[in-house]
Each structure stands twice: as C-alpha cells, then as structure tokens.
Amino acid sequence: MCGIVAYAGPRPAAEVLIDGLKRLEYRGYDSAGIAVVVEGGPVSCVKSAGKVNALERLLRENTPELMEAAGCGIAHTRWATHGEPSDVNAHPHSDEKGKFYIVHNGIIDNYQTLRKRLAEQGCVFRSSTDSEVIAHLIARFYQGDLPRAVAAAVRQLSGTYGIAVVSPLHPGMIVAARKGSPLVIGLGEKENIAASDLAAILPSTRNVMYLNDGDLAVMTADSVEVRNFENMPIERETTRVEWSADAAEKGNYPHFMLKEIFEQPETVENAIRGRIDHEMKSALLSGLNLTPRELAEIGRIVIAGCGSSMHAGLVGEYFFEDLAGIPTEVEQAAEFRYRNPIIEPRTLVIPISQSGETADTIAAVREATAKGALVAALCNVVGSTVAREAGRGVYLHAGPEISVASTKAFTSQVTVLLLLALLFGRNRRMDRTDGARLIAEIEALPDMIRKVLEQVPEIERIAKRYAHCNDFFFIGRGPLYPAALEGALKLKEISYIHAEGYHAAELKHGPIALLDPAHPVVALANNIPGRDKMLGNIQECRARKAPVIALVTEGDAEAEALAGDVIRIPECSRYAAALPTVAALQLLAYYIAAERGCEIDQPRNLAKSVTVE
Ligand code: F6R
C-alpha cells in the first residue's frame, strides 16, 4: 500500500522517479507526487490526485525543465488511509517553510497527539493525512544534521512507516527510515535508488540492500550508510536479485493479470524445479532446514495468511491432513494474531504471503515466534519481511506479480504446499508407491494448466454471456471448496460483481433462498470424491432456474449434460484438482471484467500488498 521511490544520481531525477512510480503503481493509485531538489535551487514539488499518468502529464506540460533537471528526489503513489485522495493529501508533504519534504508508507498511530502538540507550538497543517506530522517533526528537531533530525523525529512515532526525506539544505542527500513498511535500496553505478519494492529498482540495478525495522539509511549518489535510530552504524549485506526488469513488464498482453495467468505453466514448473527427490520419492526443500527427526516431531500445523494466500492454505489443509496425517488449521492472519493462539512445542506455523509484506501476516509471524513455534514461510518476494523474520521456508519463484489480483502466486503456493505434504507424508505414513504417484501428479501440473489455458475461446464466450449478471455463487467440495472461495474472490475484486464462495453442502442451509434465473452458480464438479453429491447440488440449482456454469472433468458426459455451460478440466486426482480449476476461474473472472470494461490490473479501492492493518 503506497509506493515510495527516492533517487540520488546523475540522471534527471524526475524521469527516474516517474518511471519508478509507474512500476509501483499497483501498490496504490489514487494520487501521486514528487519532490526534486536541484543543487542550488528550490525544491520542486508537484502532486496530483489520480494516477501516475496524470502527474506525469502535469509535469511534462507545466514544468518540462524539471523532467530534465539533474538532482535528487522522492516520489509517492498513494492508497488513501487518512484523508480523501486529493492534491493536498497527496505526498510529498513538507513543513511550512518548505525545508523538509517527506514521503511515507504506513500508518502513524499517534498522529493525532503529535498533530495537536505541534499545532500548539504553531505548526500549520495543510493536509488531513497522518503523514504530514513527520515533516513538521523533522523541522522541529533539525539543528544542521538531517539524519539526526530524521532519527529524532521517527523516535516520536508509533505505528508503521517507510519514509524518505529530502531537503534543499542537503542537496544530493536522501534519508530513509523503516519500521513495519518495506524499504529496499538499489545500489547502482554512481547512483542509488530506494523504493518500497524491487519493481522500481530493477531497471537500474539488481544489487540491493534490504533495510530492517529500525534502520535509517543515508543515501547519496555515491554512498549508502545504514544506522539505527540512535545513530549507531549498522552493516547490511548486499544481495543480487534473480528477477529481471522484463519480468515486471506487460509484454504483448493487454493486462498484467492475463500475462500472469498465462505464465502459470512456467511458474508452477519453477516452483517444482529441483525439488523432487526421485530416489527417495519425496521432496527436497532445503530452505526448511529441518532434519527428518524434527519433521517427524511436528504434531500440528497452523497456516496463517490473508485473501488468496489464505485460500491456498485452505487447500493445503487437505493435503497435510490427508497425505501426512498432521492435524492442520488455517487462520486468517489477523485472527491468528489477536486471538492468543495456542502454540505447543511441536506446532509448525506456516505463514503464506506472496509479497511477504502483509501487515497481519508479519504480525502472525512475530506472534508465533514469540510463542516459541517453529515458523516456516511460503513467500514469493525474496528478502521480504515475512521471509526474513521466519528465517526458514520455501520461496515460490513465481517472479514479480504485478496485477493486484493474485493468480500465479496462488497456484505456486498450492504447488509448494503439495510438495510440503509429499515431504511430510514420506516422512510419516506415505509409502514409496504413493510417493511416486504423487510426484507424477505434481510433475503433470504445468501441463494441466496449459490445457485449461487452451480453452480461452470457450471461457471468453461464457464470460460474455454472463457478464451482465450482478450476483454469482461459486460452490465446491473438498479441496475445491477453497477453490470456490478463490474463484468468487477473483470475480468480485476485478469485476465488482457480488460473488460468494460456498461449500456446496451449505447451499441448502440458507443461500439457496437467493437462487433465481439472475443468479448464476459456478459449480466445481470435477470427478473427484464429492462429485456425485455436487451433481445433486447442480440439479437443485437448476430446479430453482439458476443458470449453472459447471467445471467438469474432460469426458464426464453425465456432468456436462446437467450444466448449461461447461468448462473442461483435465482428469486429475483430488490433490491436483484445485490448480487447473482455479486457472479456469481466473480466466472466467478476467474475461467477465474485460467485458464490463473494468480496470483489471488496478481495481478500485484495492492495492497490492496490504501493509496496514
Ligand atoms: C487477491 C489478493 C489478496 C492477497 C492478500 C494477501 O487476489 O491478491 O487477497 O492474496 O492481500 O497478500 P499476500 O499474499 O501478499 O500476503
């Protein structure tokens, strides 16, 4: 939520910042702004409600010279929390004299107390944001040393923040600080870039330094020094990122979401590559760093995540219980954190997060760690907070996921959960034959998804037929129940259609009252255990004249005959079924949203990476 970029180097800062904001726009897109300090000149600060394009237009039309000026600067794309999206509430914010400009990602919990105190001291506030207090605090503490003033200011804050600060009193210097919101610094050739995530950095460099909570970085074109908030120097290691900048480009696809859906055969393959132990008929997941004895001692698994990541966890629950016999629960990460979870010495907590920066999931990791749990994270973003704080886990290797709606991360998460279940299962009650069978299924996953993607013309046709409907039900059983939840989530978030995911058995306990010809039901009726009951549920829906779109196993004529519209899923076991099924549901949601002319990659009110509670 909210994207920050800061640049120090010889290139025109505004160009680099605007390019960075475009790449971070999926983090928030209701307003944007930049502040550039040109040596010897004043600070130029331009802000605008709306998307980064609106800001860019403003800059090119009104201040073309700024686009060419060398200097250093900070920029921000906003997802509003305090104060409506407007020019005034857009970042950067400054003190009254325009000496200190800040951009902020996060929430300052004590801003009202600080604001009151500063107002009593004569500060005049212009915006309704929580962030503006930071600029005024820095001005109050400044005595000639910008890093010290920033450190003194952040010591007053409670809440979460990633900030970047510039001042005309220190041209060429950027001070950044983090607590609870991500910040990474790209180390280039005679230039450095700080940003909320890698997407803004990769076009310039792949050498990066991740800041930890409590770090303050002083950055110029030639140097980056990291200190703590007490001004003591800290060493942070430099790592090289595998992702290329191209991976975060749309290529020939109209939307990132479609590109990412089509990447899935490859991303699932990447999640599997090098992780199958053919000799032992098991999985090799070295990032777990657990001995066979430690594995065997796990008595219970608790999975924590939000949104699609939680849905992936719900699929994983079936795997762990069924294949490994380990009692497993899935908790919404916020619920986990606040309900005082029971953690026994043999509990393994698995936080799942694409971004690794979701506030509630980070908090769940901290709660689990504090209670002495073994924590192993499933993350996509290498070096993210969840990954680092868990200390052990499995990376998804799905490449950057830019579309706000998660697609390839979900299928990679489910794939990795299946690999974990293979490992846990073989460590316990699964024999070699069953291990080999499961491996064959895991290795067939990319092709299964490929076959679903071949059905685009049919799925597009179905999408067009139903795009006018305003309410949908998605129903499933077993591991396809969380797949139904995921299908409904995909549809509602990108098309704004009301969609609900239900266990098919729940239909009769209330929701069936809503069924009528205007309520299509998407029924996940693959030929896995529960299919016969699902066919009964389809009949019940048809009897209420609700149109049924059924996802059925290829060749299942009986199921096909019952449904109005059919999407065919390759024959597979109940362990594999969620992956090709969800790929089909992603396409259905995508084409319905496209038909309705929605802004698919940047749905209203949403942002990728929910870094506030
Ligand atoms: C849905 C979606 C969200 C995320 C959720 C968790 O399409 O993208 O529901 O899955 O915000 O995000 P991560 O996985 O980054 O923790």
Image: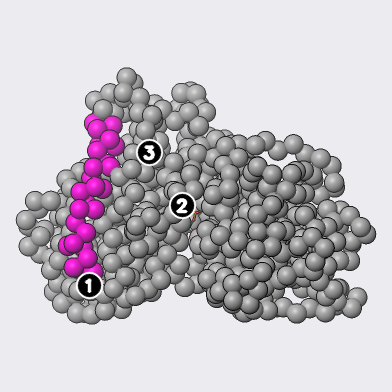
Q: Which element is circle 3 on?
A: helix
Residue visible at 65% across and 51% down? 193
Going by the image, does 301 lie left or right of 82?
left
Q: Is residue 596 above or below residue 292?
A: below
State the residue lying farthest toward the right: 143
What residue is pinned by disc 3?
A: 270
Going by the image, does 493 lie left or right of 38?
left
Please state the extent of the stretch shown in magenta in the rendering.
Answer: 437-464
Q: Which percent across, then down, holds residue 9?
A: 69, 51
Give the quadrant of residue 40.
bottom right
Numbered label attached to residue 248: 2
Q: Which percent across, then down, holds residue 510?
A: 30, 73
Q: Which percent across, then down, holds residue 373?
A: 58, 39
Tell me the CA gap for discs 3 and 2. Answer: 17 Å
Ligand 1 under 8 Å from disc 3 Cβ: no
- Of badges 3 and 2, the one in the foreground is 2
